[in-house]
Image: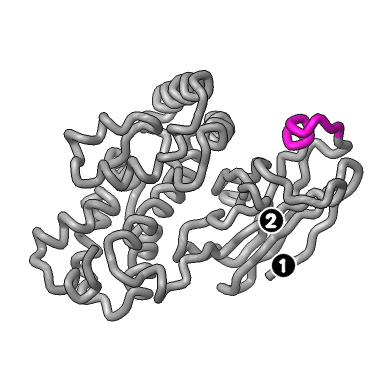
Amino acid sequence: MITLNQLNSLSGQEAFSKLEQCCVSKTWINQMLESRPFLSENEIIKTAASIWYNNCTIEDFKAAFTGHPKIGNIDSLKEKFAHTAEWAGNEQSKIAEANIKTIDDLATANQEYENKFGYIFIVSASGKSAEDMLTIINTRLLHNPEDEIYVAMNEQHKITVIRLAKLIENISNKVDLSSHLTTHALDTSIGIPAKFMRITLKGLRNNQWKPMSVGITNSDGRIADVLPPGRLLIPGTYTMTFDTENYYKKNNQTGFYPEVSIQFEVTDNSHYHIPLLINPFGYSTYRGS
């Protein structure tokens, strides 16, 4: 870990090596180097997002994906990017808790994903179980290649920010790393959070609903990282779709609504929290805080 001042003072080669631990896209790294000196921890997070979303191309996204091992396969990274292997291992630590069938299914799905899209499955794995990742990859396998690349690039930037926080001292203390958009599902029929529910965020692109993010609620019914830190939704209409059908099946219940889709309008940079209160035969929502 280094200070922001140290990053500003490093030679170009030394700083390149440090930033490469966060994202291996040369376009992203070089433009980050050109942006030095960073005057604050907040500025480096904003700059990282601005470069990624405004200046990088699909080819840059795919280049960044090469800096990750396949989920569950840490050894594949050791030789190519040895200095990122430890961080990748920590990010995928939940894999070790999975049973053999889940691991096998995840390996199969990863191969299907790579065959279909031409790059490995990218997901911000921190805090996610192998079962969570299996659900996510199986959902994303249904996407077409033109849509999936934008979901994957959002996941890549989540990882980049996590690693910047590991690289630079005090980022977590000085910068609000929360997502512009969060969600929380509560099962009012039993009075507990609706955990392990799949939720998909969609936005309009070319007048069609397109996936932006796929996540699973945690044990508290929340998804805190729908979007990466620094990623602001442009004003417009968006949809969050809650997979209530499979949630009820897992809980041996029968629900009337197979899914719940909530449309909402983003008008500014303030935080948006979209909660869902559900029971098998009804649901409600409101703008949370």
Please name whichever residue, 14 or 82, is drawn nearer the observer in this view of the structure.
82
Q: Position of residue 134 (x, y in %)?
A: 54, 31
Rendered residue at 49%/20% (across/down): 100
Q: Position of residue 147 (x, y in %)?
A: 51, 40
Residue segment shown in magenta:
246-254
Rendered residue at 46%/63% (across/down): 229
Rendered image: mark on residue 288: 1
Q: Position of residue 51 (x, y in %)?
A: 33, 62
188 w.r.t. 168: above or below: above
Q: CA distance from mark 1 to mark 2?
A: 9 Å
User: How was this image coloured?
Assistant: one colour
Rendered image: mark on residue 226: none
Query: Can residue 251 be found in the magenta stretch?
Result: yes
Residue 243 lies left or right of residue 148; in this view the side is: right
Q: State yes or no: discs 1 and 2 in contact (Cβ < 8 Å).
A: yes
Specify whether residue 129 is in view: yes
Mark 2: give few (<14), some (14-19) or many (20+) Cα within 10 Å. Answer: many
- Count how many numbered circles sit on residues in the image: 2
Residue under label 2, please give it. 184
Q: Amino acid at mark 2?
A: His
Label 1 sits on a secondary structure element that is loop
Residue 84 lies left or right of residue 119; in this view the side is: left
Residue 194 lies left or right of residue 1; in this view the side is: right
Specify whether residue 208 is in view: no
Mark 1: give few (<14), some (14-19) or many (20+) Cα within 10 Å. Answer: few
